[in-house]
Image: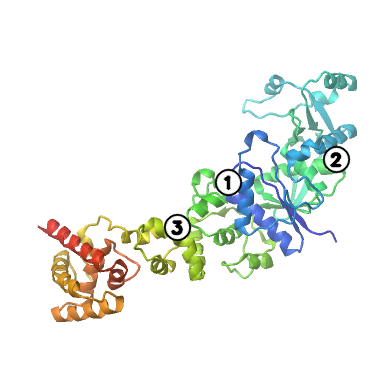
Amino acid sequence: MTMVKTRFAPSPTGRMHVGNLRTALYSYLIARHEGGCFMLRIEDTDQERQVEGAVDIINRTLAYAGIVCDEGPDKDGGVGPYVQSERCKAGIYMKYAKQLVEQGDAYYCFCTKERLESLKTADGYSFYDKHCLSLPKEEIEAKLAAGEPYVIRLNVPREGTTTFHDEIYGEITVENAELDDMILIKSDGFPTYNFANVVDDHLMGITHVVRGNEYLSSSPKYNRIYDAFGWEVPVYVHCPLITDEKHAKLSKRSGHSSFEDLMELGFLPEAIVNYTALLGWNPVDNEEIMSLDELIRKFDYTKINKSPAVFDIGKLRWMNGEYIRKMDPDAFFEAALPYLKEAVPGDKADYRVLAELAQSRIETFMDISELLGFFAEVPDYDISMYAHKKMKTTPELSLEVLRETLPFLEELADFSNDSLFEALKGFAAEKGWKNGQIMWPIRTAVSGKETTPGGATQLLEILGKEESLARIRAAIAKLENELG
């Protein structure tokens, strides 16, 4: 049996969109699940759309995602070059295009831009009329010798139908009359995306082609080329559209459509990969949290859905939170440290303690700033925050509590969490207050937040005596000023 071989063939046009990441991931999972080969090919025939450094972005993204290539620009498997512009310089595409011309399955087209514009319909649609198909051989040779610009077009019959099979969508048949004589070689000598794809997939032994369902309409054109050469057609796997929460196509303008966008928003690579795998597919056991190895073991491309997949950032946040909570504490600390330093700058911050507070309470690393930012500075807050019905606390009572508690705290030598808790609990009993009536005002005073990662005495310990007392004094002044 032929070994399964898949490929990821991105264009170097910028950051890797989630849809492209899914294509790479599914191609990789198919190859690994079947014990086959996964190849990287750079499709840079559209020179105008290239972005400098984009190939580095592709390699970096695959590395972060844990997707390892068996063949590619840096791993020669004997069917290179693996960059289409290099293959073009080697004359590969022109050789095969001329073979089709000699067979009568393709032809030279010398039509000017003006003539092609004249073929456009009122709605802007253009369908070539095979004008150059009937040019005499002598005229073609003369035009070529004179250096006239040309393209090479596929000669698609106007009669009959073309049928192809997709593993997800089944048998699809189109009328040949709907297929244009597509360009194989452009006037700059570069192949079109469609033609280079077919030639390279065949020459490189690709058995399974994974791509988005926006390419379904192009598949009949691919098959016409395969048929013209007499080549075996690969297994097609067209994946469903990815939409945003409003069911619009996920676009770069969304701000979280690329792998690196998501990493910059504080998501873990493993969580991004896990979530991306579920954009159109689910394992039979309906498990959601899966490592890359588990995905390899469970992935079955025949179970990919037809219906659009919704990219739900909330669901990704939840999944990322699950991954964060399972991280080794040391690994979490190293990953979180830049965010901790940004949220709580300064030499005195105990980042180990802050990391321990954060790990079980965040969904992305970007949440650290919102969660812990008050350790750097108390945010502006409304004194209504001191009111708590359950604890029967009001701003007025809170002011009284803070005024009387301040000198008590000033006299304490031990500012550790346990010691503070016992001391304040005893002080509350002595004054006839409930524990919450003393803890709530203190926590609000030192944090300025309705919810905090830790109780009042834990915050006092982390902030230290000097900073804690300074914040309580500031809170007393704020309450006095606003209560009058």
Q: What residue type is labelled 2?
A: Ala
In contact (CB < 8 Å): disc 3 and disc 2: no
Q: Where is residue 429 in the image (x, y as percent from the top left)?
A: 17, 81
For this orientation, the residue located farthest to the front is 347
Give the mark nearer the N terminus: 1 vs 2: 1
Q: Is residue 432 above or below residue 32?
A: below
Q: What residue type is labelled 3?
A: Pro
Q: How many residues crowd mark 2 within 10 Å: few (<14), some (14–19), many (20+)?
A: some
Left or right: residue 398 versus residue 215 is left
Question: Which residue is label 3 attached to?
Answer: 338
Q: How far apart are marks 3 and 2 (CA)?
A: 57 Å
Badge 2 element: helix
Mark number, residue 422: none
Q: Which of marks 1 and 2 is in front?
A: 1
Give the mark nearer the N terminus: 3 vs 2: 2
Left or right: residue 200 versus residue 335 is right
Question: Which residue is label 1 attached to?
Answer: 15
Question: Which residue is label 2 attached to?
Answer: 228
Q: Where is residue 359 in the image (x, y as percent from the top left)?
A: 44, 67
Q: What residue type is labelled 1?
A: Arg
Q: How far apart are marks 1 and 3 (CA)?
A: 23 Å
Q: Which of marks 3 and 2 is in front?
A: 3
Nearer to us in this view, 20 or 45: 45
| Whether residue 280 is visible | no
